[in-house]
């Protein structure tokens, strides 16, 4: 019986090693493809928040990192610098709305040199289907309402949902989610407005530049 136990143990060990090897090989063979797919998805979003007529450079490669409480996190967040004919024209910056109904909401905001928003998208969220998920462009066009807007000293009160006296629609049965996104977009634009020159002066240290 002891020999049988040893034999079975050896067989199990061989299968375990073989399974581990297959997983490792699969990961190795698919890693580049996964990275390529993620890069394509990011490029698609970047070109939505910063339209092609605003840049002629590779946005994914023109990336630097910033850190500020206005971005809703203490983690470094990427900023993608758009340029046209060699001059900065806009930037797309990722940020966090930490106070969503079901957790954090990750957004990206495109902002022109004059402070006007060129586009906004939600990158990830866990909001309730049929209610808070209307922040997702696949569900509704609510997120498009930020395009063309800016944040100034004179329009601070407008950067709220209508229930709070602002200009942005809330959702029926779900005010917390749009309120969190409006606040995060406003804070992101304010951060860029206050730090634009410093951001543009930073070295490009992420995206395709750290590979």
Image (cartoon, grey):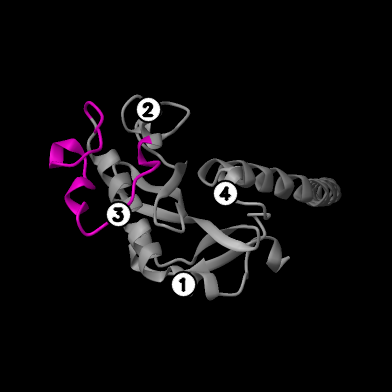
For marks 3 and 4, give the CA distance.
20 Å
Pointer 3 or 1: first along the chain: 3
Q: Of 158 and 207, which appears nearest the observer? A: 158
Q: x and y percent of residue 143 in the render? A: 39, 36
Q: Is residue 158 left or right of residue 40?
A: left
Pointer 4 or 2: first along the chain: 4
Question: Is most of the magenta stretch helix, strand or loop?
Answer: loop
Q: Secondary structure at mark 1?
A: helix
Residue assigned mark 4: 54
Tell me if residue 10 comes above or below residue 190 in the rendering.
Answer: above
Q: Are there few (<14), some (14-19), or many (20+) residues within 10 Å of tag 3? A: some
Q: Which residues are magenta?
A: 145-173
| Residue in the image at 39% along x and 51% along y | 116
Q: x and y percent of residue 20 in the render? A: 78, 50
Residue assigned mark 1: 197
Q: Are marks 1 and 4 in contact (CB under 8 Å)?
A: no
Tell me if residue 137 comes above or below residue 103 in the rendering.
Answer: above
């Amino acid at each position: 019986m002891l020999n049988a136990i040893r034999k079975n143990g050896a067989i199990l060990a061989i299968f375990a090693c073989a399974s581990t090897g297959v997983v490792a090989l699969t990961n190795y063979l698919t890693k580049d493809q996964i990275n390529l797919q993620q890069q394509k998805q990011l490029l698609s979003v970047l070109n939505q928040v910063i339209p092609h007529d605003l840049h002629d450079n590779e946005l994914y490669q023109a990336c630097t990192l910033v850190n500020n409480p206005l971005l809703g996190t203490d983690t470094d967040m990427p900023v993608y610098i758009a340029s046209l004919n060699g001059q900065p024209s806009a930037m797309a910056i990722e940020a966090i709305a930490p106070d969503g109904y079901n957790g954090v909401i990750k957004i990206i905001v495109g902002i022109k040199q004059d402070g006007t928003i060129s586009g906004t998208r939600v990158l990830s969220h866990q909001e309730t289907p049929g209610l808070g998920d209307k922040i997702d462009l696949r569900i509704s066009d609510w997120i498009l309402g930020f395009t063309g807007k800016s944040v100034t000293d004179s329009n601070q009160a407008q950067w709220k949902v209508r229930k709070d006296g602002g200009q942005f629609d809330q959702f029926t049965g779900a005010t917390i989610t749009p309120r969190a996104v409006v606040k995060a977009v406003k804070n992101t634009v304010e951060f860029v407005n206050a730090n634009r020159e410093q951001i543009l002066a930073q070295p490009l240290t992420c995206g395709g530049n750290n590979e």
